[in-house]
Image (cartoon, grey):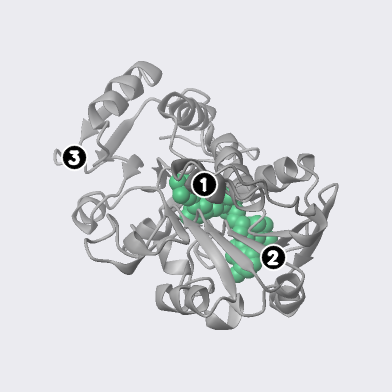
Amino acid sequence: MNDSNPNPAGAVALCCSHVEGATWESRLRAALPKASLTVWPAVAAEAECAIVWSPTQAFMDAHPRLRVIFNMGAGVDALMRLRLPTHARVVRIEDGGMAVQMADYVCHAVLRHFREFDAYADDAAAHNWRPRKPRLRADFPVGVMGLGALGLRVTETLVKFDFPVLGWSQSIKHVEGVTCLAGADAFDEFLSRTRILVCMLPLTPLTRDIVCSATLSRLLPGGYFINVARGAHLVESDLLALIQSGHLAGATLDVTREEPLPPGHPFWTCPQIALTPHIAGQTVIDEAITQIASKINAGFGDPRLSGFVDPERGY
Ligand code: NAP
């Protein structure tokens, strides 16, 4: 692999435990016709480039010359827990068709809660015609934790529904119509002005367990939590206790600490919790492959290349 070569064709190691692994492989072969693609558990020890989905430590150890590892999704927390080859840099998918799905999902959850659609569905099931008083958007400010490729799109879409929207990130952002706050010092203010909290953070040592009793109890009374990031952001017993105490109205969870959610887990039977099986933003194979192939074809010396993960920050 040569940084300056605009059309590098080298050994590429593919490690894909995805259910659609065969589709990934055939589409990658078509998108990278000059590359020699080796599919794990076959080993291309000379490979400087890998494309991975949930790789194992054995895969990393078998490819010590890797310089660039393309992750087939946006979240890299599982990858960052591995011991990577010394000179390897990780590149993640940026949006790749996931941002619009996240916007669908979060706006649907916000609107379902705000417009009380679950209560109307229960009424309809009981043949009960019962209009409720309209609620004011001003009473339901939505706070989005994480203003990256996905969180930004979500805040922009929520603004179009006229909700007051707050955003919180590591470094300060400027988004029209959104009250942007940044850093640990602003976290209290962010929470105390939020009623519907949305987690769109990457999972890092700083963000693990960030949604806990202390966090959730600072939300405006009748708070609601939506998690579309990672299960380990949430201390699950704290969420349940605050729902039971009535401080929180409920939650929509796309992710849980253990996936699939085990039988008998209290989330299954908590009426105030809506669950989905980690589908909020699914990788769109063609968009992801176009993004990865264009970066490989550009050569890794291209200064416009983006999506590199900072190993210090973990995202
Ligand atoms: P991203 O572009 O890396 O953005 C991450 C955002 O979080 C940035 O705004 C960053 O702040 C902020 N952040 C990170 N650490 C922080 C901290 N300690 N305090 C405050 N803000 C912090 O990530 P993305 O592409 O939007 O994806 C976000 C996450 O969504 C992924 O990591 C993944 O776990 C999850 N995800 C879930 C699904 C699903 O289906 N449920 C699908 C795809 C992704 P700065 O901007 O200042 O750096």
- Estimate the spatial distance between the alpha carbons at disc 3 and disc 2, rounded to whole Å: 46 Å
Q: In which quarter of the view is residue 21 placed?
A: top left
Is the distance from the Cβ of mark 3 to the nearest ligand 1 atom less than 8 Å? no
Where does residue 36 sit, x and y in percent of width and height? Answer: 27, 26
| Tag 1: amino acid | Asp
- Estimate the spatial distance between the alpha carbons at disc 1 and disc 3, rounded to whole Å: 53 Å
Which comes before the other along the chain, label 1 or label 3?
3
Where does residue 23 sit, x and y in percent of width and height? Answer: 28, 24
The single residue placed furthest to the bottom in the displayed view is: 214
Is the distance from the Cβ of mark 2 to the nearest ligand 1 atom less than 8 Å? no
Q: Which residue is depicted at the point 51% across and 27% down?
A: 294
Which comes before the other along the chain, label 3 or label 2?
3
| Tag 2: amino acid | Arg
Q: Nearer the viewer, residue 222 or 82?
A: 222
Disc 3 target residue: 40
Disc 1 target residue: 123
Q: Nearer the viewer, residue 186 or 212?
A: 212
Left or right, residue 157 beside residue 5: right
| Tag 3: amino acid | Trp
Q: Are there few (<14), some (14-19), or many (20+) residues within 10 Å of tag 2?
A: many
Disc 2 target residue: 195
Do the CB atoms of the residues marked 3 and 2 lie less than 8 Å apart? no
Q: Which residue is depicted at the point 63% across and 44% down?
A: 107
The single residue placed furthest to the left in the displayed view is: 42
Disc 3 secondary structure class: loop
Q: Are there few (<14), some (14-19), or many (20+) residues within 10 Å of tag 1?
A: some
Q: Are there few (<14), some (14-19), or many (20+) residues within 10 Å of tag 3?
A: some
Q: Which residue is depicted at the point 57% across and 66% down?
A: 249
Is residue 286 shown above or below 102?
above
